[in-house]
Amino acid sequence: MVAYQVIGKPAPRFEGAEKVTGRAKYAADFSLPGTVWGKTLHSPHAHARIVRIDTAAAKQVPGVHAVITGADTRDGGLWGRGVKDAPVLAYDRVRYIGERVAAVAADDEDIAQQALDLIEVEYEEWPAVLDPFAALQPDAPILHPDFNSYFGFKYKQETPSNIHLQTRLDRGDVERGFAEAELIVENTYITQRQSQGYLEPHALLVHIDPADGRVHVWHCNKVPHNTRGALAVAAGIPEERIVFHPTFIGGDFGGKGNSRITPIAYYLAKASGRPVRMISDYLEEFLAGNPRHHVIIQLKSGVKHDGTITAHQVNYVVNTGAYAAFKPFGGIGGANQAAGPYRIPNCRIESTFVYTNLLPGGFVRAPGEPQGVWAIESHVDEIARRIGMDPVAFRLKNLIVEGEEAPWGEQFEHIRASETLQAAVDAAGYHAPKPAPGGAPGASAASPGDTAKPTHVGRGVAVGERGTGGGEGTSEITLNPDGSVVLGTPIFDQGTGTYTTLAQVVGEELGIALERIRLQVWDTDVIPSDAGLAGSHGTLIQTSAAHEAAQEVKQELVRLAAQQLEWPEAQIAFAAGELRRADTAESVPWADLLKRAGRSVSGRGHVVAPRSHTTAFVAQVAEVSVDPETGEVKLLNFTTAHDAGTVVNPIGFQGQINGGVVLGIGYALMEEIKIEDGRVTTLSFGDYKLPTPRDIPPLKTVVLPSQQGDGPYSIRGIGEAPCTPVAPAIANAVEDAIGVRIRDLPITAEKVYAALKLRGQDAEKPAQPASQGGVR
Amino acid sequence: MAANSPYQIRLTVNGEPREAGVPARRTLVDLLRYDLGLTGTKEACSVGVCGACTVLLNGRLVASCITLAVQADGALITTIEGVAEGDRLHPLQQAFIEHGGFQCGICTPGQIVAAKALLDTNPQPSEDEIKDWMMGNLCRCTGYYQIVESIARAAGARG
């Protein structure tokens, strides 16, 4: 292993003191003289024509400064991160319950609400389509008749439909593969909507400077350069007129890459001539947010009795909701992952993204991947049980090894899938005797005597993988004659510890104590473009950029030393905070050199990295007990193993794993945005359950360090992988514990109880062939 | 504004006497954040579930998003801004920094104020007691492990 001085050592949070004292400023904490409050009116209908909006009474309310509708915003452009299909405010029609149709700016929130209540909207209700399969029918109402005119979509509709993206990938000969199979297993898996669950609802302050027309924005946004561009389009103004100012971001989890209310606040600021603050309250976050997508995943696999997979087919249907605008490129991942990192010679992967009259889905930590991994890792377990193989042995037989391609044709590098799985299985004691009697796989229904037993313990395993995303990053280091060090970055912190890892690079490369570094977070004027934070690339991109900046600084110092001290440049090296001359063993501290020169030196690093093919494998083992009387699933232990590359900051690394696993536990067991007749019914954190400290199991983390990764420090991203295999590991453990299989998330006590009841009824009837799959 | 803010209240916030005119429906969190400029207290769920807005009212934990400002008339309020003693961080604050007790930091003021109330009444809590007490403070970033550890370490450091 490379020996580092600072990289790899625990580093407390760089911005820690600000955050523990309440001094850290988030978007809602900024204020300007004359600031007014913006609030929005939401559609009560899933699909309707807007016949008329009357805002006259609202405008008369004392303290109201502006009332706007879609008529005021439609001359700008449509809204979206990449693809653009969402109006800033609805015009002509509404496409989901909760869509924003009007907005008010007023002296305070109460006055704004009073004015909203006085806006009269006349709707003509249209038939709504809430189910993605119904939306695919030829007679379904079409949500976006103008789809082909929208910006950014690669997909074009030949005839009007609700499909905005369709993909098909074929490798090998799937039909032949199924013909060669000795057993065909087909299953359908369903996932629910999961909220990002950040505790800071979207908040922003927009001010249009009357002196020069510049638009100043303070918004909880992790991709400010991207959103600046989106706002320029929606506002119909040049991008350079807009500047996003740094704020801390109160949690992201994929949701702070867009900003539904940003263009609305802009139009309110324009109409009112005042700085406008908008804060989505949490009811709006649930009603009109952009949660993890509802996906229906149909899998069909052909296998031989020895465990060889001969063919695999994925049909991945994504319920987009009313707009695709919150998926940067119009899609999410997960369809490929639904084939798994397995050796599959014949594979077909199809995905269909469908508009429905429901709240739009968006990006949530590892967008799409928990859905795909939920399906394949449940399915693989089911196959193993069907052919009487141990689920771990089945996976070990089929996981790809170095040199093999993933089923979707990607060539990963430095594959350690089996090693990671083995590490998790060993650490968890997966094969150890169970602490209490449990339902063995495939066991028949428990006898009345068995159901009296208090616990049924089971273990389940699941694997996943996540490559580090690509992107653009910039970093700047300035050394001053007074010995101070300034680290410049365009990153707005969303909590993952970027400032700390940046500081560690400065410490590592320049031998500077972290406490001496002063951070300078840039607004969007400073550099023309930046990728911000996404796709688990933060640590890789940022450390790469800072490393480059540090080398620049060192070269600058060497050149300066040659100039000032008249040393031969070839003899000068920077080490441990000093310039050293090799031939005479003279040395001078860098600050002394700068004092002598009377100037600062700085270096800037700029990197554009492609998406990495060095994927990081993760394997997890859940140990659960199931109460046969109630169906309650209790997590007894959880083990997570990661092929990690260099761990830059062990505190932050463990924090990403802990938070990811618990987000996955919420997804597996409790979190669900529920919808009835198109209306979200879980409208607060009272109804929508996030895990609490009482819901977390003892967690064992296994790290497989490796020299292989990307960038100067061999990095592999860790932000997203920990959350993906959690749900199938738990579902597999539930089956191991009590013999029932849950195929739709979340795995609630009600579902387990119902499955147990159903099995009890089946057991009283004569044996019937399995409803899904069949032996050929 | 007087017509809209008919209730004159006096309270002590972090040891300082403060006064404000508020409407009856003004919440304590809005009073603190927007009338008194103490933005360290955060509002997240607005229904008293998540704990981000936790402050101490006469030493007791309250959710300031569902407490009316007029209910705080005459009260002693402690917010996150009043936890450190000048530049000296409270052992809880120090422990949260050293042990990864936060990531994004939005729930942290509430976490620390709640944990302070715990240690003020139970200086040596067990892990179970910490988890029980902190159930009313949600965190999406940390999965709680390092929060529980931070509180336990702070308790240990205080001896």
Image (cartoon, rainbow, N blue to C red):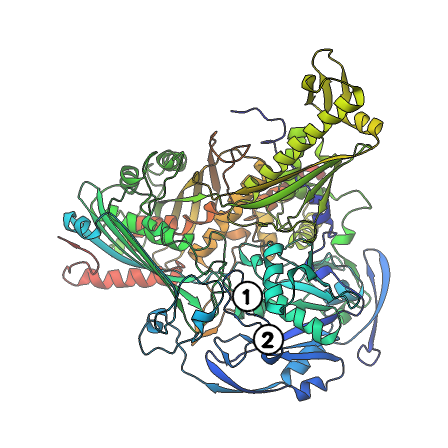
- Is residue A742 visible in the rendered image? The answer is no
Quadrant position of the N terminus of chain B in the picture: bottom right
Residue pointed to by mark 2: A75
Q: Secondary structure at mark 2?
A: loop
Q: Nearer the viewer, mark 2 or mark 1?
A: 2
Q: Is label 2 in contact with label 1 (beta carbons under 8 Å)?
A: no
Q: Where residue A187 sits in the image (x, y, percent)?
A: 27, 57
Tell me which label, 2 or 1, sits earlier in the chain.
2
Give the residue drawn at x 57%, y 60%. A258
Which amino acid type corresponds to the residue marked 1 in the rendered image?
Gly
In front: A354, or B103? Answer: A354
Quadrant position of the C terminus of chain B in the picture: top right
Q: CA distance from mark 2 to mark 1?
A: 40 Å
Q: Where residue A220 sits in the image (x, y, percent)?
A: 64, 58
Residue pointed to by mark 1: A686
Q: Residues within 10 Å of mark 2 (few under 14, many from 20)?
A: few
Question: What's the chain of the residue with tag 1?
Answer: A
In front: A45, or A666? Answer: A45
Which corner quadrant of the image does residue B40 belong to?
Answer: bottom right
